[in-house]
């Protein structure tokens, strides 16, 4: 199998895992969240972006259109698990990352 076929297969698999299962009810696909108004993706990632968040405040967002990924490792449970400020921080970090590398991610 050539590199082109491998890339098409990988792209197809990503589309399966990121396809929104229940539009209007959730922005989640099979294991991944997708960009939406209230997601932790911020406002600068493309509509094709997908990501995942963790309880301790971690997040990963991949934007294939901009050839960009944003990984945030945090410990939002310090000093207490009631600390929810990370929700805004995730969005801000994603926007700052896009701004730092430019709109194309290259």
Image (cartoon, rainbow, N blue to C red):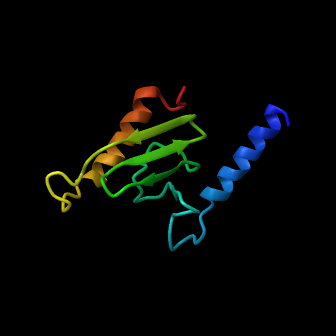
Instruction: Point out residue 46 in the picture as x, y percentages from the top left corner.
Output: 54, 45
Which of the 4 quarters of the picture holds residue 10? top right
Of residues 43 and 106, the one drawn nearer to the viewer in this rendering:
106
Instruction: Point out residue 77 in the picture as x, y percentages from the top left corner.
Output: 22, 55
Would you say residue 42 is visible in this rendering?
A: no
Of residues 52 and 42, the one drawn nearer to the viewer in this rendering:
52
Which of the 4 quarters of the picture holds residue 7? top right
Total count of labels: 0
Q: Is residue 82 left or right of residue 8?
A: left
Q: Measuring 23% from the left and 58% from the top, which residue is drawn there?
A: 84
30 w.r.t. 40: above or below: below
- Residue found at the far right of this picture: 1
Would you say residue 66 is visible in this rendering?
A: yes
Quadrant in which the N terminus appears:
top right
18 w.r.t. 101: above or below: below
Of residues 83 and 104, the one drawn nearer to the viewer in this rendering:
83
22 w.r.t. 84: above or below: below
Instruction: Point out residue 85 in the picture as x, y percentages from the top left corner.
Output: 22, 54
Q: Measuring 52% from the left and 43% from the top, which residue is drawn there?
A: 62
Q: Measuring 52% from the left and 35% from the top, which residue is drawn there?
A: 68
Quadrant in which the C terminus appears:
top right
């Amino acid at each position: 199998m050539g590199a082109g076929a491998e890339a098409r297969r990988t792209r197809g698999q990503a589309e399966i895992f990121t396809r929104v299962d229940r539009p209007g009810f959730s922005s989640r696909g099979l294991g991944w969240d997708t960009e939406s108004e209230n997601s932790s993706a911020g406002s600068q990632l493309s509509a094709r972006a997908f990501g995942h968040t963790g309880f301790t405040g971690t997040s990963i967002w991949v934007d294939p259109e901009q050839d960009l990924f944003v990984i945030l490792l945090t410990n939002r449970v310090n000093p207490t698990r009631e600390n929810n400020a990370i929700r805004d921080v995730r969005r801000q970090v994603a926007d700052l990352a896009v701004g730092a590398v430019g709109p194309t991610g290259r």
